[in-house]
Amino acid sequence: MPGLLEGKRALVTGASKGIGRAICHALAAEGAHVTGVARASNELGSLSAELGQAFDPWPYDVTGEEVLTRIAAAPAFDILINNAGTNRPEPFTQATDAALDLMLDLNVRAPFRIARAAARKMVRGATIIHMTSQMGRVGSPNRTVYCMTKHALEGLSKAMAVELAPAGIRVNCVAPTFVKTPMTETMFADPAFAAFVERMIPMGELATAEQVAAAVVYLASPAAAMITGHSLLIDGGWTAQ
């Protein structure tokens, strides 16, 4: 049986680790040809080896110009997953300009520019998915900058959805709770933080990267053909309280 995304061309940023890596595997398993963007690393190389001909590695920094040039020169993508992002937890009154600039650049400016470049070539039936967070819906201690960037991305997605709908291009978000990834590993080394997260998730467990990837596949597939401007929470009930 053909996969849900057979013959589709997908572009995934932040592809080499964690959620991005799981998304690449999930899209390829459903028949998509995946182009993965991440800085050159052993992880990107091993992902390419795992997926073989179903995968093209693009070893670029998503905040730079090279990836935009490559998108402009490539055939149109059917699916864009803006997954690259970061967090630097700091108390609000001690938040540094360096952390502010880093997160605005990587979490907001880069996905805007990449989505703009990809959308210029997309045709009817294409879809864009921004990876946001439950923190794009609520606030949390020591995460003012991160929350701000994810709220911004949620707003961007709604505006894009309205503007691109006449062209038949859908735009949605996937908003996970905390997932154990290389980015969050050091956070969970703090027992107080780990206990806080456990208290906040009614289902009592973290999401997995594979669960997040499954949500991405759904929103990218024909099963979600009438869904746009939506944010799909994968948060175990965190924001239901």
Image (cartoon, helix red, strand yellow):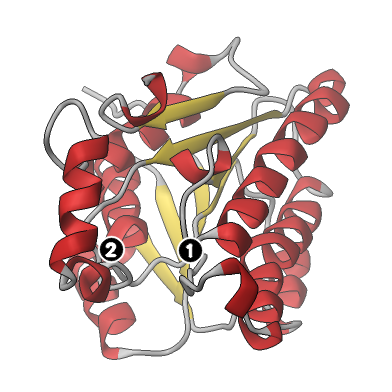
Say above or below: 27 vs 1.
below
Say above or below: 93 vs 39.
above
Which corner quadrant holds the N terminus? top left
What secondary structure is found at the residue carrying circle 1?
A: loop
Residue 195 position within the rendered picture, expressed as x and y whole percent measured from the top left: 15, 52
What secondary structure is found at the residue carrying circle 2?
A: helix
Residue occupying the far front of the picture:
93
Mark 2 crowdedness (10 Å alpha carbons): few <14, some 14-19, many ≥20: some
Residue 175 position within the rendered picture, expressed as x and y whole percent measured from the top left: 46, 38
Residue 198 position within the rendered picture, expressed as x and y whole percent measured from the top left: 17, 43
Q: CA distance from mark 1 to mark 2?
A: 23 Å
Residue occupying the far top of the picture:
226
* Mark 2, residue position: 18
Under mark 2, the amino acid is Gly
Residue 226 position within the rendered picture, expressed as x and y whole percent measured from the top left: 60, 10
Residue 5 in sight: no
Tag on residue 142? 1
Tag on residue 28? none
